[in-house]
Image (cartoon, grey):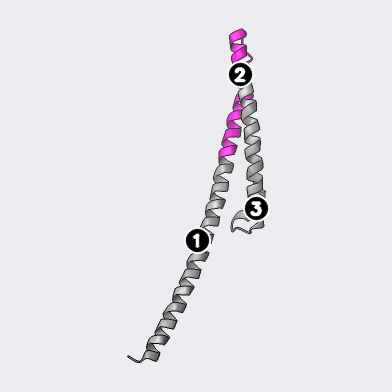
Amino acid sequence: MDPQVVRERMNFLEERYLELISLAETRRLRLENNKRLCQFWWDLADIENHLRDQEQVLALGDTGRDIISVNWHLAKHRNAENNLADLGRGLDALDVQGQQLILENIPGAEHIPDR
C-alpha cells in the first residue's frame, strides 16, 4: 500500500474520531442538563406534595377535648410550622435552581415560570 494513501486514511479516521468525541461531549452535556431539569421538576413535585400534607394537618378543626389531646394538637401544629419553614427554604433553593436553568437556556426550562 502507498504510504500517502495510509496517511490520508489515518487523517480521515483521526478527523472522524475527533468529531465523534465532540458529538459525545455535546450529547453528555445535553443529558446532564436534562437530568438537572428532571430533578428540578421531581423536587418541585415533592415539595408540592409536602405542602398539601401540611395543609391537611393545619386545616383540621379539632382543637382537643382535654389537656392531653390539646398538647398533642399543639405539638402537631409546632411540627407542621417547622416543616413549613423547611419547605420554604427548599422552595427558595428550587427558585434559585430554576432561575439558573432558565439563564442557561436548558431546553424545557422555559416552562419553569409557569409553575
* Residue type, numbered disc 2: Ala
Q: Quadrant of residue 66 in the image?
A: top right
- The front one of 114 and 105 is 105
Q: Is residue 40 above or below residue 63?
A: below
Q: How many marks overall?
A: 3
**Disc 1 + disc 2, Cβ < 8 Å:** no
* Residue type, numbered disc 1: Arg
* Residue type, numbered disc 3: Gln
Quadrant where the N terminus sits is: bottom left
Helix, strand or loop at label 1? It is helix
First in sequence, mark 3 or 2: give its number.
2
- The front one of 5 and 95 is 5
Task: Name the residue: 47% across, 69% down.
Answer: 21
Label of residue 100 in the image: 3
- The front one of 14 and 88 is 14
- Is residue 60 on the magenta stretch? yes
Residue 85 located left or right of residue 46: right
Residue tagged 1:
28
Residue 3 located left or right of residue 88: left
- Residue 52's spot in the image, x, y percent? 59, 32
Q: Where are the magenta residues, as a range? A: 46-74
Helix, strand or loop at label 2? It is helix
Q: Residue furthest left?
A: 1
- Camera sees residue 59: no
- Is residue 9 on the magenta stretch? no
- Residue 69's spot in the image, x, y percent? 59, 12
- Residue 16's spot in the image, x, y percent? 45, 76
Label of residue 75 in the image: 2
Residue 27 located left or right of residue 94: left
Q: Quadrant of residue 84 in the image?
A: top right
Task: Name the residue: 63% across, 27% down.
Answer: 82
- Camera sees residue 26: yes
